[in-house]
Amino acid sequence: AAAIMQPFIGSEIDAATFERLSREAYSSFRHPDVVPLVQIAPEHYLLELFHGPTLAFKDVALQLIGRLFDHVLSQRDQRVMIVGATSGDTGSAAIDGVKSCNNVDIVILYPRGRVSDVQRRQMTTVDAPNVHTISIDGTFDDCQDLVKAMFNDAPFRDANNLSAVNSINWSRVMAQTVYYFTALQSLGRSASFSVPTGNFGNVLAGWIAKQMGAPIEKLIVGSNSNDILTRFFDTHSMQMTSVVPTLSPSMDIQVSSNFERLLFEMNDCDGGATAQQLDAFRAQGMMSVEPDQYASYIAPIFRAHRSDDAETLSVMKRMYQDHGMFVDPHTAVGIASAEHCAEPGIPTITLATAHPAKFPDAVKKATGVVPPLPEHLADLMQRNERIVDLPNDLQAVEAFVASRQRR
């Protein structure tokens, strides 16, 4: 892992220290292989990314990022206030990654009633003086817009030393490239990847890994009913609609932050042109790319599929009946997308992004069985919660964040 990421680190952290921080980060995972590869069909594999402390793929990056923050900040004698938005998994993974950091405070915004009980409690039951959670009356896109607005408010950002852990933070994407390489190394040959995605960060990491030389054939983008990405890959046009609540809430997103990074590459790294395109998209609710851009960047590698809740439940039921295996609804979207888009003779690796116990209601609906929580979270539903309810209002959120800054 350290060797793959080191070129992005440069001289900021010496190689020996970075290797130690990486080793410490991944020692928190419960499986000896960290992210094991499991075969489910002759040419279909699951890459289990949920063996970290909070049972989601985001632990892979955020266990490392917390350590990177604390190391660099202690070297500089500085503090930061992390603010982030979560559609379910980023929040708990970020909180777990920094809860023991001396130089970091964290405030996480989540959409009220739009995350699972397990996801919410993984955030709200952490008893640490530097951890704060805000329940926002709105959608994930509203939460993400509030976070972006705080970063765009330069006086507020600078006064409170704001930093990010959402995948707008490049180090998140950087760390996620690693498991594409390790999966291919375990498999021993080239493969396609099916990636359930809403914010585009996880699949973007695969695209970057391919640019770095990983033998990736195709990247299959799996969407739920909030299918703005699938529609883009099918039609060359991105058109915004309302967010629909689904069984896979971490993908209930219409504005995919990390798509901007791919768009930047498609625009020959022209930041001004990319900004203009995105401003028009936010104003008009739609955006298209030129045919030559699509032909060069999209058509050769990306495929896409949309799974509604009925198909998601069907896959979850079939995986349990055929393999005795629970899968969470996001992973089920990835499996369905792999089955629809896989090419003969090319193995497909589906990213299993969350532990099924994070979504007990969906799993029970599909299989009739409630998956047990791992031992370290067995009493989660009995722990006390700490939540602050706020409206979708920038001024109210900024006032709360400023009041929680430890000087």
Image (cartoon, rainbow, N blue to C red):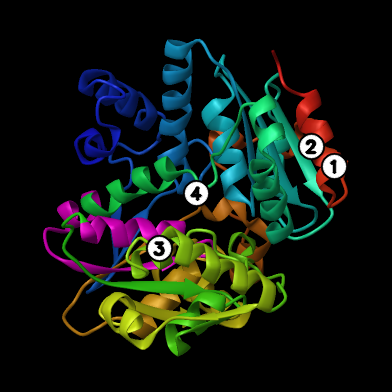
Dot 3 or dot 2: first in sequence order is: 3
Dot 2 or dot 4: first in sequence order is: 4
**Magenta stretch: includes residue 194:** yes
The residue where tag 1 is placed is: 395
**Residue situated in front as seen by the camera: 12 or 67:** 12
Considering the numbered disc 1 on the image, is that residue within a helix, a strand or a loop? helix
Cα distance in 3D space between marks 3 and 2: 30 Å
The residue where tag 2 is placed is: 398
Q: Identify which residue is drawn at 26% across, 56% down.
A: 209
The residue where tag 4 is placed is: 167
Dot 4 or dot 3: first in sequence order is: 4
- Above or below, comparing residue 71 to residue 162 in the picture: above
The residue where tag 3 is placed is: 264
Cα distance in 3D space between marks 4 and 3: 16 Å
Cα distance in 3D space between marks 2 and 1: 5 Å
Given contact means CB atoms under 8 Å apart, are the residues at marks 2 and 1 in contact?
Answer: yes
Given contact means CB atoms under 8 Å apart, are the residues at marks 3 and 2 in contact?
Answer: no
Q: At label 3, which amino acid type do we have?
A: Phe
Given contact means CB atoms under 8 Å apart, are the residues at marks 1 and 3 in contact?
Answer: no
**Magenta stretch: includes residue 193:** yes
Q: At label 4, which amino acid type do we have?
A: Ser
Residue placed farthest to the left in the image? 188
Considering the numbered disc 3 on the image, is that residue within a helix, a strand or a loop? helix
Residue placed farthest to the front in the image? 272
